[in-house]
Image (cartoon, coloured by chain):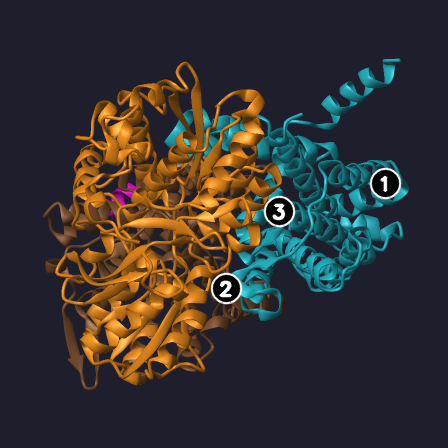
Chain colours: A cyan, B orange, C brown
Amino acid sequence: MSTYVAGLLADVGIGLLGGLSVYIILATGQLSLGNAAFMAVGAYLCAALTVLLNLPLTAALVIAAAATGVMGIVVGFPALRLRGIYLAMATLGFGEMTRSFFLNFGFTGGANGFHGMQPVSTLYIWAWAAGVLVLVTVLERSRLWLELRAVNDDEVASGLVGLNATAIKVGAFGFGAAVAGLGGGLFAHHRLYIEPADFGFEKSVEMVLMVILGGSTVAPGALIGSALLTILPEALRVLVDWRFTGFGALLILVLLFRRQGILDRHLWRRLAGRRGAAP
Amino acid sequence: MLHGHVVRTWRLPGIVGAAGFLGAAAVAGLALAADAPQLTQAGRLAGQEIRIGAIVPSSGPFAEWGKTNTITLKMLEDEVNKAGGVDGAKLKITIYDDAARPAQAANLMRKLADDDQVLAVAGPLTSSAVEVAFPVANQAKLPATSQASSKPGVAALNRPWGFRNTIDEGVLARATVPYLKSAYKVASVAIVYDAKDAVSTSIAKGVMPAVMKAEGIKILNEDSPVSFNTGDIDVSAQITAIKALNPDALVIGADYSQAITIIREMKRQGFVKPVIGGTPLISSAILKAAADLPIVAPATFYAGMKGDSVAKFSASLTPPLRKGAGLPAEIEPSMYDANIYEIVNMYLDAVRKAGVTGKPADLAADREKIMKDLTDLKGFRGFSGPISFNKDGDAIKPFFVVLGKDGRWTEMVRGCSAPDGKSC
Amino acid sequence: MLLQQVINGLTLGAVYTLIALSFSLVMGILGVLNLAIADLFMLGGYFGLTVVIGGHSVWLAIACAMVGAAILAFVVERVAYRPLRDAPVIMPLLSTIGFSIIFQNVALNLWGSDPLQLPDELFDERIAIGPASVGVMQVVVLAVAIILVAALAAIVQKTWLGRGLRAVAENWDVARLLGVPASRVVSAAFILSGLLSGAAGVLIGLHYSAITPFTGVDTGLKAIAVMVVGGVNRIWGVLIAGPLIGIIEVMSIVYGGSAARDMVVYGLMILVLLVRPQGLLGGTRTEGQRV
């Protein structure tokens, strides 16, 4: 495997974590357009821990993910008041505020960015990414996830059967944020340099796109989406000057002709079934 | 270093006019013995292919530079191959577009290193992309030289494989500021900068204040420099606030595209004072912003620059540039075109001098030879004069303080980026 | 200087108002964030400036920009919104981002990445007002913003189209039952917002006299904040919110907080969403007409 392919794979793995962070929050019917902010916090915190305090990477990642998770919970409470497009706009504002914060935060370099991280292997990134994917897939079969879905489908009814919608929604925000923070930590150690521009509105949109294009009803959809968004800009190079036009057009086409995303429950069951049947 | 008669024996190959083997010989460093063994030399790599990579931003906010860079490299490839190649080997430049996105730049660096097996890479252009792509080059042990990045210390973090054919903004400011001071009787300045951009921020908040103080120039808004963000269309409040301070000149930390917005607003508010900035100001577009407003900036190349080599370069590059898709009809070669042209020529020079074989089995050794050649580069003649690299990987070469006024750049002062300021 | 800064703030506010109005028209009626508006506004600027640089009158430029942007807005509606009308709100939002990406790329390929600049002779003239001064274009921007808002108000309040818009905003199915051609009304909303953003683009292009293919994005995000502060469902709110945010931005620069500017603006937006979702000026929380 060439380092080029390995590099792209590492991007796919980090993208998968970003996509999953949106997926988890979306499962409760909440749309976040500001997850790049959680990624930024995870990235800067994790990088500061390994560079300034010489903490081992794994420990730094765990701390960064936990701290970002707490932040997600804090953001999740006010988010309860909003839904749909209003929540999307509020999280958009939160993302822009966070980016602006890091731009002005001299301690982590401001506009100059932050250096000094040690590189990680693609395998290490994938150990985390695959681990979280498996965790989410397992969770999806649990009662907890049923509750998440129930809250998404009908909050009043789920309240009647005794589900605590508040805890579930806020918890999903926390979990999603932690996953984004983890992705951010790995991002910082894959790139070896981070700057506020890495975590703008565009990044948040990219994370949402991964889920919507890949398939928003099953967790592995985020994997398909992440692979697509990483590889498409490379694959479309044949279009030269028009490659972003091609990208935009493809994006619209997928949304129009496969609304549920490329991977849906039906397709996933078929794929999983066939795989299960193999020895 | 003295040049004298050597000045005319341009070591950049393939410049139109220096055709055929004569050109190739001059290139091979045999300028003083044009009748010497160029034939054997020319054939040393016959049948081989010399592969060089380039990363340029042909889409995104710096598309113009990426597109002209691409045309420059294609012209160079053509010239070298028409003139008999690199010691007989065919030159192949693989050019990729990173859209000025760091992620793409890093992946392309890996692609050039592994899949395309190039000997060395020219680019990427933006500092953000360099920050991410140079560590990759360093891991891959692949020489890489940026044509434009001037954010302080970026190459220094990625030694020994990272180089920049640009001069640290701090060195340049030590020449531009004294010129501004004496030419326009400047006793006080104010600062405005693009807070979203790293190079702009470091020029406005680090480099310029230090030099201004050393020159005894008062900074009127040092405690609260006025900022804006990349993409802002309205900077009227910033200019009104600065106008109220009544400085003798304005320091602009911004690339030319954003600086145009500032200069137009200055003009609109009738605040016509000289402006000073770093290399990111150099472009032909900025000259159109306000003809009567003097722009002081450092450059190693500018449209309309004097010199035979420059004239030849401009004469052969300008027509294809003006035919280029999506480029303005009146476009001129930019400083970054000159820089990337020099970079690839340094590489080719090293291929010839350092005994690079071009064989796949020797790839690692060849790359190291090129890196070493660049590290100890001596006597390579660029457009402004001889080029070498300091220990931080940044270029030591002559530069000019230029004044942009009435639609053109004029050379005002000549400087040198060597530590003593004169060994160029 | 303060007077001058207030003028600066009001102009910036008018710019935000015009774009926010385009967002608000579609958002208020259909509940859809059409992010392509940011780039329709950018393209409007290019259309207009190209016409002016070609030696034609400013009025022709405004007309071309408005019509051009309206046609593209109609295309966005047909391709990116209509087939996804029943889908979750995120779907049309993302498909309009698809258009946004395409528009930027097309502008980049057609006009290049260097700023398109108006020639000097077309430069703005200034009128002195005591210690301050105001540009002719600045007055035009302010005036056109007010005229367009008034025209929009007349359309929404007085015409059958306005009644249709309000009915669709209330309830799609009921509107159809009442005989409102709902789908044509939706197209009309997009076209109106296209006309507005095209006008905004050309006025801003003429006033600031330099635009790039990337002009739309940041200004567009700010305009969304303005729309929210004014009250998403009340297009009139932006008339106050635009100048308010314009003045806030300007004052943050005057009092040395230019770095914190974005944090203040987006912070205000979040605060309004959380505390007064009906907007700063909105009436009661739940009722009231949406348009």
* Disc number lying in front (2 or 1): 1
Q: Inspect the image, locate mark 3, and give the three-letter code of the amino acid beneath it.
A: Arg
**In this figure, which residue is indicated by the disc labeled 2?**
C231
- Residue type highlighted by circle 1: Leu
Amino acid type indicated by mark 2: Gly
Residue A152: x %, y % from top left: 74, 46
For label 3, the SS is helix
**Chain under disc 3:** A
Question: Where on the picture, by quarter, is residue C246?
Answer: bottom left
- Residue A139: which disc? 1
Position of residue B271 in the picture relative to residue A125 (left or right): left
Disc on the earlier residue, 1 or 3: 1
Residue B393 percent location from the top left of the image: 48, 52
* Residue C211 counted in the magenta span: no
Q: CA distance from mark 2 to mark 3?
A: 41 Å
Tags 2 and 1 on a common chain:
no
Residue numbers of the magenta segment: C64-69
Would you say the residues marked 2 and 3 are in contact, meaning their CB atoms lie under 8 Å apart? no
Q: Residue at x 81, y 48 (%)?
A: A157
Residue named by callout 3: A191
Residue A117 position, x and y percent, is: 67, 53
Tell me if residue A200 comes above or below residue C89 in the rendering: below
- Magenta: main secondary structure: helix
Q: Residues within 10 Å of mark 3 (few under 14, many from 20)?
A: many
| Mark-to-mark CA distance, 1 and 3 | 31 Å
Query: Which image quadrant: the N terminus of chain B?
Result: bottom left
